[in-house]
Amino acid sequence: MRGSCVIFSLILSILPGLARAADEPSAEEAPFVASGALASLLAARGPDGEAVLGQEEIDYFEGLPARAKALFDAAAKGDRISAPSHLKELLALRLPSSKIELLMQDNCVICHSNPDAQDPETLFSADPAAAGSPAHMNLVEYVSDVHFRRGLSCAGCHGGDSTDDDMSDEIYERMPEAPKRSTDRTWIPDFCARCHADPNFMRSFDPGLPTDQYAKYQQSRHGMLLLGQGDSNAAQCVSCHGVHGILGPKSPLSKVYPQKVPYTCGHCHADPEHMAGYRGRDGEPLPTDQLAQYKTSVHGRALLDRGDLGAPACNDCHGNHAAMPPEVSSVSQVCRTCHAQNGELFDGSKHKKAFVRHDWPECEKCHGNHAIAKTSDSMLNEASSPLCYECHRNYAQDNPNCIPTARFFYSSITTVAADTESLQGQIEVLAERGLDVDPLSETVGELNDVLRQMRARIHAFNRNEFEKVEQGGLQQIEKGKQQVAEANAEYRFRRNGLFASLVVMALLAIVIYLKLREIESR
């Protein structure tokens, strides 16, 4: 009993202390008090007497955790933030607290975004054009960069220590001095490869990202020109990915997002002045109309107009880091990535042997390359397209079956297509009459499949194989015509039955009427 009293007394003596501790804020929760340097920046007014910082910036700052505010305070006391306009620009980024803390711990960015400490050439600005800074010194883009978002700030690429107040010698040693680094771009691939070609380093950030980009680039046409011939006009890493605003390929704002790739490549390849002097394997000047042609092509319209990210762009045919003009033998392999059946059919055809003999690119010979148009049956029409017939007359004089076979393909396909379209029209007519059109719809669907197979079989250029598919289509056409006939017969039966019913009903009405008259007369 006495022990219990002692414990109870101890609890009573501790409770007031616990209550005071609960009322007193911890060090983490202690209210932030700005130093004189930061307070004066927050309250600064311009020559017109208006506050430099708007209410939005003030509200954002007030909403930050105390530790983030302390970083701003330290930067102000260290004179790294020396102007209210600089503070305003940093707060106007409105970054999440975790990101603003990451930014404020990087003295490189804080110093290089301070207009009092930098010339325009080295000044990070939210509006580079207005500040007279280079486009790559965009502060908004920098804080969205994939490197910054993963914790890799300036020192990650440029060296040094981001917590230092002064730049170390290592920073100057990593890249050539200005203006040489702008005119001689041969240093850039190796600069990026320091990290991106190191599997151990990259594993810490993205284990799935390949680390062979530099090796591939060295074997590319761009790499051979830049590294082998010292041609700084050739594309390198920053040409396609950017500098401080690098984004992943899944971001619609990225320069390597599928819909942006044609324009990224076209930045150089569609510029006649930039491409002047470059020649292809045939010795002819490289064209600069590839982008214009691609935009009109079936692939370009699918990707750029309809947003079909599965449609091929420049890199699908030419490669990414190992970009090269496709060899004649590899063009067809590129096309087969999507058009696999057509490639398989072509492999077993007589055309395959002829194309190998003449060293012709398989798909490109008939369909073109950058300006590939949507295929149509008219490509087989001798009257409107000489595609097949001129080739056969020039190179297949000893084979009298070539031209008749092409004519047969065209005649057969257009006949089946016309009958299919006719049956499709019957579906609407019969449906309006209230008849069951599901069987006919299935037949038309099967006919469309047959048409696709017939059009694909052209690539085999084998009349016997083609006729097997055609016979299936002709059988479906007969089936469809029979279904239409049966549906029309049912419609006539219903119509005649209705007419007969109306006649019987009319006769009954007359009989009833006469009977009523007879009853009334009695």
Image (cartoon, helix red, strand yellow):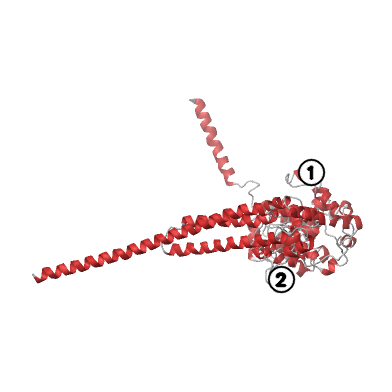
Quadrant where the C terminus is found in the figure: bottom left
Residue 439 is situated, as x and y percent measured from the top left of the image, at 47, 55
Q: Is residue 463 left or right of residue 244?
A: left
Label 2 or label 1, whichever lies nearer to me, is 1
**Which picture quadrant has residue 360?**
bottom right
Looking at the rendered structure, the kind of residue marked 2 is Gly
Residue 85 is situated, as x and y percent measured from the top left of the image, at 73, 66
Q: Residue furthest left?
A: 522
The residue at which mark 1 appears reads as 199
Q: Residues within 10 Å of mark 2 (few under 14, many from 20)?
A: few
Residue depicted at x 84% and y 69%: 273
Q: Secondary structure at mark 1?
A: helix
Taking the image as drawn, is residue 36 in sight? Answer: no
> Against 100, is 421 above or below?
below
Q: Is residue 309 left or right of residue 425?
A: right
The label number, if any, that marks residue 356 in the structure image:
none
Residue 285 is situated, as x and y percent measured from the top left of the image, at 86, 66
The residue at which mark 2 appears reads as 46
Q: Nearer the viewer, residue 77 or 4?
A: 77
Q: Earlier in the sequence, mark 2 or mark 1?
A: 2
> Against 218, is 19 above or below?
above
Q: Secondary structure at mark 2?
A: loop
Residue 438 is situated, as x and y percent measured from the top left of the image, at 47, 56
**Which picture quadrant has residue 241?**
bottom right
**Which picture quadrant has residue 282?**
bottom right
Q: Nearer the viewer, residue 447 or 241?
A: 447
Residue depicted at x 81% and y 47%: 197
Q: Are marks 2 and 1 in contact (CB under 8 Å)?
A: no
